[in-house]
Image (cartoon, grey):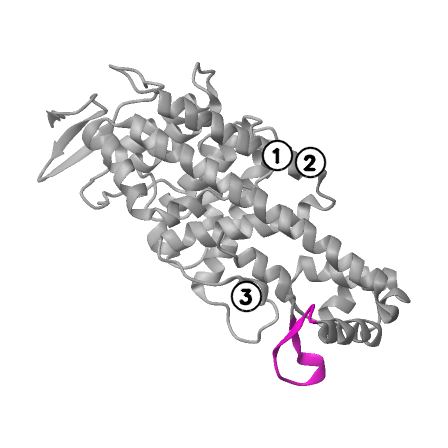
Amino acid sequence: MVKIEIRDAMRKTGDYEKLGDLSYFIPHSLPPAEPGLELTTEIMTLYGEASFSLGQLNEMSQRLPNLRRFIKAYVLKEALLSSEIEGIHTTLIDVFTHTLNDTKISKDTQLVLNYIKSLDVALQMIKDKGLPLASRVILAAHEVLMEVGDRDRAAPGHYRQQSVRVGDLIPPPAPRVPELMSNLEKYINEPSDLPSLIKAGLAHIQFETIHPFLDGNGRIGRLLIVLMLINSGILDAPILYPSYYFKKHRFEYYQTLDRVRTHGDFEGWIAYYLKAIKDSSIDAHRRAKEIELLEKELKNIIQSDNKLSKVQKTTIDVANALFEAPVTSITEISNNIGKSYNTVYNVIKRFLYLGIVIEKEKGGKRNQLYRFEPYISLLEKEY
């Protein structure tokens, strides 16, 4: 085994170990050293702005009448965006209708649903069971994430047992992965002088450099950011979708990740990461306000419409069901709210007239799907 030192870098961030014809990059443990991370004026300014934006988002989440519903929508948005970065393409409509269609669910849609389930599993382990954010949680999340698709190739819930290449990077050889992940989990869980928000950004780059899995590293690495922010108390619920910014500035995302290895530029990555947190927080906050406004407008319509006001409680129940499942059928709503098919049909018929819902596709009366267009438009809106 030959060690090749990194040269011409701001700081040394690891070693190259040559095994056969391949040179594997072995990252040094966190935090950055020789020199330590420089909290530049730019970083501290961005840190203040990102913290403020996160605080605003948290404050809004605490006064939302139905936080669970917002969490569901925002986790779905992060799942879609994070998956798109990895070339996995599906749509909000595909996800919302996967239980209503007779056709087999697509692999890409299932992988997005798996992301949502993997976050739920990880949150239950660290919040409900009180487990530390360590390998046990990360492996469990990965097992759920990769339970379909290239299951045999991805080795769900297990660190890789073979070498991989990521662009110009050959991550550490498989036998080194458990040790490197153990060092990372110690860093995640030990007290630090660095702010927790910045610490989460450092943990993400370390995870991606180790590249512990055969597949799913990007999605689990981005999930780790949200888990760390919740675990440290910075974020109350997973209503932040950092992949919004990472996808929008994908080239810079990979470039700044690479520069940590090639130039020791942790500062450049942290500046980029803090911009991602700031912009994603602003986007999520703005979207939450608009969804909140939509809900108020809908209630005003229900109260002022002569036909709907006569069955106001039932109509509000139907509206809430549409926020839960914005593409649905009358039968589904009827089952969910415990009202007769005809009662729900009369409300939906009025919603159609008022433009609150549209028919998604023509078919028999009982097979007809309805789309809560104003809500879907807000979820898909690009600010």
State which mark lies toward you, 3 or 1.
1
Q: Percent x, y for residue 159?
A: 35, 40
Give the Cα distance between marks 2 and 3.
Answer: 28 Å
Secondary structure category for the residue under label 1: helix
Which one is closest to the eye, mark 2 or mark 3?
A: 2
Which comes before the other along the chain, label 3 or label 1?
A: 1
- Asked if the residues shown at circle 2 and circle 3 are in contact, with their CB atoms under 8 angstroms apart, the answer is no
The one nearer the camera, 74 or 53, is 53
Query: What amino acid is labelled 1 in the image?
Result: Asn
Amino acid at dot 3: Ile
* Magenta segment: 355-370
Mark on residue 58? 1
Q: Residue 271's x, y, as percent?
A: 36, 30
Query: Which amino acid type is shown beneath numbered disc 2?
Result: Gln
**Is residue 85 left or right of 258 when viewed as pictured?**
right
Q: Is residue 356 magenta?
A: yes
Which type of secondary structure does the marked residue at label 2 adopt? helix
Q: Residue furthest front?
A: 304
Question: Which numbered marker is on residue 93?
Answer: 3
Residue 65 position, x and y percent, is 74, 44
Q: Do the residues labelled 2 and 1 touch (CB within 8 Å)?
A: yes
Which labelled disc corresponds to residue 246?
none
What residue is rendered at 43% in x and 29% in y? Answer: 200
Task: Indicate whether 127 appears above or below 71.
Answer: above
Q: Is residue 363 magenta?
A: yes
Task: Say if residue 80 shows up in the picture.
Answer: yes
- On the image, which quarter does residue 340 sit in? bottom right
Marker count (numbered): 3
Residues under numbered marks 3 and 1 in contact, where contact means CB atoms less than 8 Å apart: no
Q: Mark 3, residues whose alpha carbon is within 10 Å: few (<14), some, or many (≥20)? A: few
Residue matched to label 2: 62
**Mark 3 → mark 1, Cα distance in angstroms:** 28 Å
